[in-house]
Image (tube, rainbow, N blue to C red):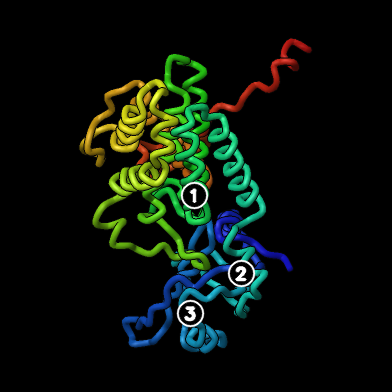
Amino acid sequence: MKRDSINSLLALLAGGSDVSTTIFVQIAQKLERRTKNGKPYLEVQLMDVEGNLSLKIWENAPWYPDFCATDVETGVAVKALWHNTPYGVEATKLSIRPLSPQEEEEMLVGSEELRKKQDDDWKVILDLVAQVRDPRLAELSKLFIETYGARFRRAAAARGFHHARRGGLVEHTAGVMRTTHALWSAYPTLNHDLMITGALFHDCGKIWENGFPEHGLTMPYSDFGELLGHITLGIEVINRLWTQLCTKQKEEEWRSLTPPTEQVRLHLLHLVASHHGSLEFGSPVVPKTPEAFALNHADDVDAKMEMLRGAYETSPSLSDHIRQRKMPLPGNVADPLPSMGRLSECGKK
């Protein structure tokens, strides 16, 4: 069966032609509406891992009863002839059916390309954690992955702007870890173990703030996420796991290590507390160590690169090389300059 994601469908429609295809989605919202003339219709929000689509289902459409009978958060295959109109995306020749368990699993992990990226990013996280030599930070990181790995892998990094999708937290965390590793290569006086561990934990509170249910694509709001926020939650996670690790036997093993164990914990907590960079952006304290400054910039760079990627994919063109501003970027976006090519090819002519 020919199948597209919502984003790939929207990209095809942007080319100006109608598209006949099937999408695997979850019904995220279904609202009963009426036109100004009192004509009833459903406003349905369809969602997959990477995108969402609003669709109006009119009462006289043959598929209206099927949508009425389908519960919110149900996975469905929607086959249709899709049209891009001045009033948004519309569909004709539409049919809807529930997804099989295998199809639902495919829908929850996204496209093959996204699945591969998130699997590769998870491997990056595990590989960099394995390079941590400080036994305290290494054991803390491994305990975190063992305890929260499954929930971590399905959480988002945000509700909007960047990596705002199921699995996005893994993508963002891997990006920040790669960037901190690169900064350590440029500035080898930085504490590599602390940087990698700080990058792993910096957004770990988003497991609660931006978490997804095991079989869902709608990000719920939680009391913990709303009342505490991910920075506070991240500090709590570190302290709880640290307490689990610090048995009397471990305290004896770690007593002779330098730097002292309590200083290691304190500096890691500072990285999480200060990673937003300023009080106005939600950090309870500003960066005060080299590693804290490096982590703040690594976090910001990875978020900005993802925002730019999204802008290049979805923002309308204003000219040959300029695209319309996409919030929260500070201005319109210019297409990047292509690379010349491999150095080995230079000078051949």
* Label 1 crowd (10 A; few <14 / some 14-19 / many >=20): many
Q: CA distance from mark 1 to mark 3?
A: 31 Å
Query: Between residues 295 and 255, which one lies in front from this camera angle?
Result: 255
State whether residue 315 appears in this view.
no
Judge from the rendering whether residue 57 lies leftward or rightward of residue 246; answer left or right: right
Tag shown at residue 57:
3
Q: Is residue 128 above or below residue 49?
A: above
Provide the residue designation for mark 1: 168
The quarter in which the C terminus is drawn is top right
* Label 3 crowd (10 A; few <14 / some 14-19 / many >=20): many
Sequence-first tag of 3 and 2: 3
| Circle 2: element type | helix
Q: Amino acid at mark 2?
A: Glu
State whether residue 130 appears in this view.
yes
Look at 41% across and 62% down and name the residue there: 219
* Label 2 crowd (10 A; few <14 / some 14-19 / many >=20): many
Tag shown at residue 90:
none
Q: Is residue 66 above or below residue 307?
A: below
Look at 35% across and 25% down and name the residue there: 260
**Where on the picture, by quarter, is residue 39?**
bottom left
Look at 52% across and 76% down and name the residue there: 74
Q: Are marks 2 and 1 in contact (CB under 8 Å)?
A: no
| Circle 3: element type | strand
Q: Residue furthest right?
A: 348
The quarter in which the N terminus is drawn is bottom right
Provide the residue designation for mark 2: 104
| Circle 1: element type | helix
Query: Between residues 22 and 304, which one lies in front from this camera angle?
Result: 304
Q: Amino acid at mark 3?
A: Ile
Q: CA distance from mark 3 to mark 2?
A: 23 Å
Sequence-first tag of 1 and 3: 3
Q: Position of residue 256 (x, y in %)?
A: 41, 23
